[in-house]
Image (cartoon, rainbow, N blue to C red):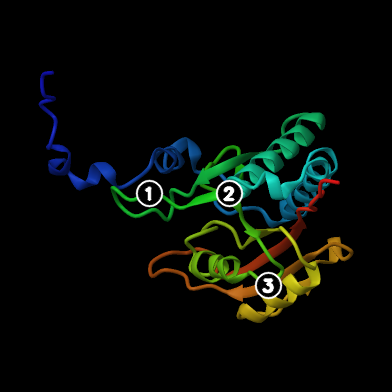
Amino acid sequence: MASDPRHGQLDKLPVSRFRQSLPHALAALPSAQNLIRLWPQEVVPQLLALLWEGYDRLHSAKLSQVNVEDADIQLERSVTALLHDEIQMIIAERGGFAGFLLRHESWELETCELRPSRPPQYDLAFVWFENPLVQWPCEAKVLRTAGAVSEYAADVRNAFLTCIYAPFSNSGAMLGFLFQGEVSVTLERVSATLPAPLVPCPQHAARSHRISRHVREVPHGKTYPSQFECHHLILPLIVVRAR
């Protein structure tokens, strides 16, 4: 096979060729100057309602019908994909357009390093239709037991609170898929491992839904929101045991 004459020359290309993504280039066009640059917080209650409604439908129609202990290969990815599909169906049933899209495993191109590193990737993200740089992310973690929250808390501290996640939003969500154990124990452990207390979400006071409020570390030279609300939704994966 003939060798490609371009082989080995990629690193010799000007670095400027790699300094912006396609969404960045589109957002910089003169015709895009009136685009929304920060996630509108008045939309957040709608997103949270969709997450809960999607979970309710997923649990009723699918999760409650199987023994999750026998179906836990790629469980986190599978549940988020199914939750994505349920929410998409809800949006479609209500007319199909809401000003935003929902993506499964969405890339965050704003905070990725220069080549060749892999960008951060959200498990789920609501993406503003006209400006895909503006995302409202949801990071999911399967919690094998009620107290196994170390990785969950690490995502809050190391990604959300450093602006690696949600650079263009002052809120986002953590979804804890609880495999077994009590929701109350999980919320207590999460609260104990974060630098801010958990408080009930007024719109979902009867749910396992809490909010922690933080001041983020904004990178030098950036104007990302420093005030941040993290929504914590603990979603049980009820195990149906074989008889």
Specify few, some or many for label 2: CA neighbours under 10 Å numbering under 14, 14-19, or 20 or more. Answer: many
Specify few, some or many for label 3: CA neighbours under 10 Å numbering under 14, 14-19, or 20 or more. Answer: some
Quarter of the view holding residue 182:
bottom right
As measured in the structure, the alpha-carbon distance from the residue carrying label 3 to the one carrying label 1 is: 31 Å
As measured in the structure, the alpha-carbon distance from the residue carrying label 1 to the one carrying label 2 is: 15 Å
Q: Secondary structure at mark 2?
A: strand
Q: Amino acid at mark 3?
A: Gly
Disc with the residue nearer the chain's start (2 vs 3): 2
Quarter of the view holding residue 6:
top left
Q: Is residue 124 visible?
A: no
What residue is drawn where x is 66% and y is 67%? 229
Query: Percent from the top left, x then y, of residue 200?
Result: 81, 71
Instruction: Name the residue beneath numbered marker 2.
Output: 123
Specify few, some or many for label 1: CA neighbours under 10 Å numbering under 14, 14-19, or 20 or more. Answer: few
Q: Which mark is residue 133?
A: none
Q: Secondary structure at mark 3?
A: loop
As measured in the structure, the alpha-carbon distance from the residue carrying label 2 to the one carrying label 3 is: 22 Å
Q: Amino acid at mark 2?
A: Asp
Left or right, 50 with reference to 108: right
Residue 229 higher or lower than 96, as above or below: below
Disc with the residue nearer the chain's start (1 vs 2): 1
What residue is drawn where x is 13% and y is 25%? 4
Q: Nearer the viewer, mark 3 or mark 1?
A: 3
Query: Percent from the top left, x then y, of residue 171?
Result: 64, 61
Left or right, 22 with reference to 136: left
Number of callouts in the render? 3
Q: Amino acid at mark 1?
A: Arg
Query: Percent from the top left, x then y, of residue 181?
Result: 77, 66
| Residue lying furthest top | 1
Instruction: Name the residue beneath numbered marker 1.
Output: 118
